[in-house]
Amino acid sequence: MDNRAPLPLSRRTLLIVGVVTATAMVLPPFISAKACAANAARPIKSSVSLSVNGEKRDLDLDTRTTLLDALREHLHLTGTKKGCDHGQCGACTVIVDGRRINACLTLAVMHDGAKVTTIEGLGTPEKLHPMQAAFIKHDGYQCGYCTPGQICSAVAVLEEIRAGIPSHVSASLTDSPQLIASELQERMSGNICRCGAYSNIIEAITEVAEADL
Amino acid sequence: MRPFTYLRARSPAEAAALAAQVSGSRFIAGGTNLLDLMKLDIETPTHLIDVNGLALDRIDTTPEGGLRIGALVRNTDLAADTRVRKDYALLSRALLAGASGQLRNKATTAGNLLQRTRCPYFYDTNQACNKRQPGSGCAAIGGFSRSLGVIGVSAACIATHPSDMAVAMRALDAHVETVRADGSTRVIAIADFHRLPGNTPNIETALAANELITAVTLPAPLGGMHIYQKVRDRASYAFALISVAAVIQQDGSGRVVLGGVAHKPWRVETAESAMAQGAKAVADQLLAGATPTPENAFKLTLVERTLASVMAQARTHA
């Protein structure tokens, strides 16, 4: 319940939604200096539509909501984990429009129309994604908290190598990157594992990569 | 994080004009640095203008034989561009030495230039920081300064610029194209883009308020051997203690720029004339007048040794 004193402007007039349609260089009437000053006092909401694991989801969110919080708190897809919430640990890694990103360092409203794949969208307990199966086979975790991020990242890493994107450890910038452990280690450095399951993680990714060759 | 209104701009000029109409506006592109700082209450915009929809994500060749890199080109795409890999390998190498795969997928060319320092006192809102809160002092001076600046520093600030990409851009003599709120455009040489801290470390670039970067241009390829050597506390996903960006020609002449030592990519053109005399001569001129702290004086030795390593690599491959 919102029991704060009402502002002279209705909440609806404060909503900032979508693209500015005016061609002239003027602010739309709902953005004014007064409205922005009012921001300090109350949240602003905005609508956003995401395609999450193949399903269209329409949300009305506080503009501050990160993609991570939208997934976990609003869509209840809690497979994606919040570790540091500052882009340092990689536990929140998801795949957006084919690319892995830190869901904690981006706003949900910035992704209107985007296709988001989380760990829930990669596989199911009955039909595991090959990377999930390989992590189990190679014991690529202990506590499991970083695992969804590791797996989403690993799936995207193999795509990046397939696309010929070089890395810091690639000896040549012009040759196709090699599928070797040092390449996988470098490319997975944005995913921290507190339990230190790194060597098994690399074995799991290597097995999936070799099966795809 | 404080509440903010949010708007998607449709053109660069519109974005700049809209930003000028609301005080407390900020542009957001990749957001990987801005949102991090907003969560910590270090950046406190009241209005975000999302520029991701602007068509600034292309890399085009210029009539001069160089490249125009759109402001929104992601770090991953810039590093992987076949023209960049072939003719501006230094830039690819610098980009790939920075951040993580996830961050490079999101971070943009313009945003990389504009990222804020990782000085621990800038990040800790309980500490004095002239950059975060002008006039409050600098807790880094006399504090934990191992990672901080050794040259071009001031009594107000000893922060470093954290970008790897910008160091390469400085070696390549990039130019920054912008649009201002009145619709006018201009071009800023990368040498003039980042400022030294002086008494106003809160002013980090030559950009005016609400001025938007639209592109970064590179002149025609320099040829030569391109080497970016970054020294850090772990092998991946860490900021530089120091870095050396070098373009070295067959005859041993070349360009050298340092990262991790100053408030901006550090280049002293006259030092490059000492290349034939070896790493020590170049390092001495590059770092003349350095004022390190006892904790970061090691950086002076590290620069000389890294430079020696870079010059040796160039000789081996020449």
Image: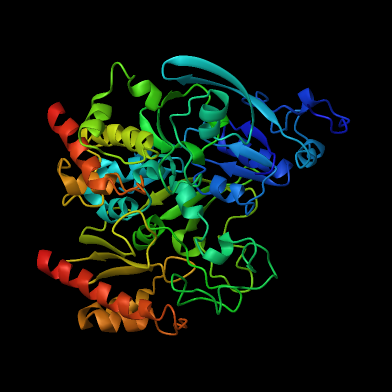
How many numbered discs, if any?
0
Of residues B68 and B149, the one drawn nearer to the viewer in this rendering: B149
x, y percent for residue A65: 60, 34
The residue under the point 59% across, 21% down is A59
Residue at x 40% of width, y 84% of height: B288
Name the residue located 46 percent from the left edge and 14 percent from the top edge. Answer: A55
Q: What scheme was used to colour the molecule?
A: rainbow
Q: Does the image show residue A173?
A: no
Location of residue B43 with respect to B126 vertically, above or below: above
The x, y position of residue A162, in whole percent, is: 21, 33
Q: Residue at x 67, y 38 (%)?
A: B18
Can the viewer see residue A132 in this picture?
yes
| Residue A111 at x, y percent in the picture | 51, 28
Instruction: Say which quadrant the N terminus of chain B sits in.
Output: top right
Taking depth in this image into account, of B308 and A83 the one nearest to the observer is A83
| Nearer to us in this view, B86 or B262 | B262
Quarter occupied by the C terminus of chain B: bottom left
Answer with the quarter of the image where residue B303 lies.
Answer: bottom left
Which quarter of the figure has residue A121? top left
